[in-house]
Image (cartoon, helix red, strand yellow):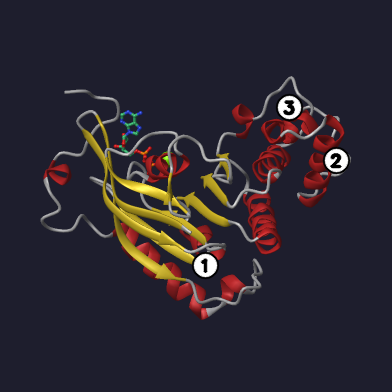
Amino acid sequence: MLRIEGLGHRYGATEALRDIELTVPEGQLLTLVGPSGCGKSTLLRCVAGLIGPSSGRVTLDGVPVAGVPERLGVVFQDYSRSLFPWLTVRDNVALPLRRHGLGRAERHAAAARMLAQVGLEGAERRRPWQLSGGMQQRVALARALVARPSLLLMDEPFGALDARTREDLEDLLLGLHRAEGMTVLLVTHDIDESVYVADRVVVLAPGPGRVRADLPVRLPAERDQIATRGLPEFTELRAAVGRAVREGPEPGAGPGVAAPPRAGVEP
Ligand code: ADP
Ligand code: MG
């Protein structure tokens, strides 16, 4: 179980997050949605242990996150920069297993199994740059999952892909989540996507980033791009998420609202 308690983060004078409280049960697929600059990536970086919180804490199964935890997988939007171009697809996927003390043959076998799970059997010996964007993001997903993490963090993973490829990868993620049962935190600014893949949607508000809405997704576990999106429950929830995202800042939210912080500006 993942617990985020009273979490705040500042970049110099910029307050990016304030008092975030979230408890994510094991195996939940939670999407984080909100306008650009509301602190989604900052929250993910705090959970990943890539940056330390300014206040509050993050614990994974009761253990405070300090530095990147072992049982963590991460996928970012920019697949072209996250894979190593000089390594084969197989070696990219096998890389995280080096710290697990497995031999070369075992690493290669695990990478091949994982590549088959993301629909890329036969691509082992190719280089990432020989693959389409969607295939590269499948490789990134395989690499994130090869060490069987209990927590998968994804920051706008499908944002750079065309609509059809994006839908295929959403369904791939759902299938992997069902098979592996890991907890997932997925950041997106696509409201439809935030509902389609999720068990729960958390909406962040900007200036500073706070939780504005926390909505359970009561859709059948089995999702289908056409049928699920046509359900009245889907349409209602999408509208509720959309309203929460678009709502103006709440009154009395503090000085951060009157003067929106600018990136990278120190006092
Ligand atoms: P999101 O991912 O929701 O777009 P971010 O977490 O990237 O939001 O940013 C939240 C706020 O923190 C924004 O105001 C952004 O400008 C600021 N910010 C993000 N990263 C940095 C940084 N490295 N230095 C200074 N300010 C930053
Ligand atoms: Mg971001």
**Which tag, 1 or 3, sits closer to the chain's start?**
3
Q: Secondary structure at mark 1?
A: loop
| Viewer-closest of 23 and 135 | 23
Q: Quadrant of residue 168?
A: bottom right
Dot 1: within a 10 Å radius of its alpha carbon, few (fewer than 14), some, or many (20 or more) residues? many
Q: Residue at x 12, y 48 (%)?
A: 254
| Viewer-closest of 20 and 210 | 20
**Position in image of residue 143 (x %, y %):** 69, 39
Q: Badge 1 is on which residue?
A: 199
Dot 2: within a 10 Å radius of its alpha carbon, few (fewer than 14), some, or many (20 or more) residues? few
Give the spatial CA distance, label 3 vs label 2. 22 Å
Q: Residue at x 39, y 65 (%)?
A: 241
**Which tag, 3 or 2, sits closer to the chain's start?**
2
| Viewer-closest of 85 and 44 | 44
Q: Badge 3 is on which residue?
A: 129
Q: In the rendered view, tell whether residue 196 sits above or below residue 145.
A: below
Q: Residue reaching furthest top?
A: 86
Q: Secondary structure at mark 2?
A: helix
Q: Quadrant of residue 38?
A: top left
Q: Badge 2 is on which residue?
A: 109
Q: Nearer the viewer, mark 3 or mark 2?
A: 2
Q: Nearer the viewer, mark 1 or mark 2?
A: 2
